[in-house]
Amino acid sequence: MSDPFATISIIGLGYIGLPTAAVFASRKVKVIGVDVNQHAVDTINRGEIHIVEPELDNVVRAAVADGYLRATTKPEPADAFLIAVPTPFKDGPTGCHHPDVDFIEAATKSIAPVLKKGDLVILESTSPVGATEQMAFWMAQARPDLSFPQTHGEASDIRVAHCPERVLPGQVLRELVQNDRVIGGMTPRCSKAAAQLYKAFVQGECVITSARTAEMCKLTENSFRDVNIAFANELSIICDRLNINVWELIRLANRHPRVNILQPGPGVGGHCIAVDPWFIVSAAPTEAKLIRAAREVNDSKPGWVIEKIKLSVAEFLQENPGKTAKDMSIACFGISFKPDIDDLRESPALDIVRALSVIHPGPVFVVEPNIKTVPMDLNNVELVDEIRGMDADLKVLLVDHKQFKTGLTPHGKFLDCKGIW
């Protein structure tokens, strides 16, 4: 019996799409990767990668060399299409952020012309509840010659499902394979087809549910984490007010057998935890009180850190009456949204540095071992190595990269947002 998914197309070759494409290709499945970024396409076709993820470069190099992975800027016919494009948010009138599904719409409409009877379309992008149904509606509008689950149920020509990823940056290749996968088809036949596709590499369990429940599951997982991080971040602010070492406090409280407080930081970043809770708040603004409050706590933490930096600047000027703020240098250690990666999406550390580049008249340095250049909007911010960063008048630890845990011990004035100094 022939393989029903001889060719797979991955739409979006970013932090999720490219590893997913590489894992499928490593199982000797023909994969066509599609991305609007010509640089990313050219890089992948050379057998190289444009993002940082451990071991991914080796898998991509082998997949391209063996002829199982190829990238292009325009969709081509395939047997299954996986959409893994960004889903940012935009400000809304109700005081919360609303999901922006423009990228999903564009990706859906781009594949519609090449769809054929029997194809499977999976939305992997983290999405608001109802996005999979909306995707199916867009496809039906573009292809009235084909039938879809919302009108033809189990007998539809095209099968549609939502199967969110749940991986940790820095461990994506391992978790793609080992983690359980939630499979939310629009019909049981859709779910069965999606599960069959993922079993090509997933060693965890493929758990079947509805598309809407699958969408809500991913949002719930990240909102749960956001609420717990907000507790730690709020606790750090309270402890600062009461002159208590929050790191020691959490260490002691966690000795209780049923307590597991997370570690505070300068905020919450990344495209998942910092974004997904707003999708729930947007859908149920009156009911999602705790989820909204957690988001507001975490979103406000970078501003609190900036105020602490301002206090440190004021103290420095009092201690050095012959100097002005222009004479004071500040070095920020880390600008990615979490340790040991190059991903800057929704990074609170980056937001803090961006604010400093505007409000601080003196030199601002960044020590970030995972990037080669700072973003263009960081005016007058210089990327330096750790040794030079340690020479700054104020050192601000924002991300606990492994290099900072084993490197130099800070001297002079410093602000530690991660409790490792």
Image: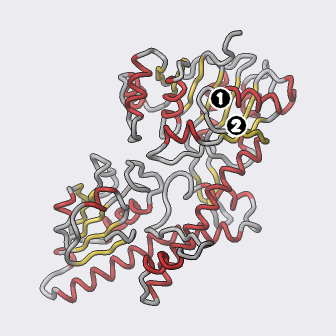
Verify CB contact (< 8 Å) between mark 1 and mark 2: yes
Q: In which quarter of the image is the N terminus?
A: top right
Query: In the image, which disc is placed on residue 274?
Result: none
Instruction: State the residue in front, 256 or 168.
Output: 256
Report the residue at 76% width, 67% height from top: 287
- Return the disc, 1 or 2, that comes first in the chain's sequence: 1
Q: Which amino acid does the dot numbered 1 rest on?
A: Lys
How crowded is the residue under tag 2: few (<14 C-alpha within 10 Å), some, or many (20+)? many
Report the residue at 38% width, 48% height from top: 342
Q: Which amino acid does the dot numbered 2 rest on?
A: Cys
Q: In which quarter of the image is the C terminus?
A: bottom left
- Give the x, y percent position of residue 112: 67, 24
Report the residue at 70% width, 70% height from top: 289
Question: Of helix, strand and loop, which one carries label 1?
Answer: loop
Report the residue at 71% width, 43% height from top: 131
**Residue 353 sits above or below residue 303 on the image:** above
Task: Report the Cα–Cα distance between label 1 and label 2.
Answer: 8 Å
Furthest residue in direction top, as rendered: 1
Instruction: State the residue in front, 355 or 400.
Output: 400
- Give the x, y percent position of residue 183: 72, 38
Query: In the image, which disc is placed on residue 199?
Result: 1
Query: In the image, which disc is placed on residue 206?
Result: 2
Instruction: Name the quadrant containing residue 297.
Output: bottom right
Instruction: Name the quadrant containing residue 311.
Output: bottom left
- Give the x, y percent position of residue 350: 39, 59
How crowded is the residue under tag 1: few (<14 C-alpha within 10 Å), some, or many (20+)? some
Instruction: State the residue in front, 303 or 19.
Output: 19
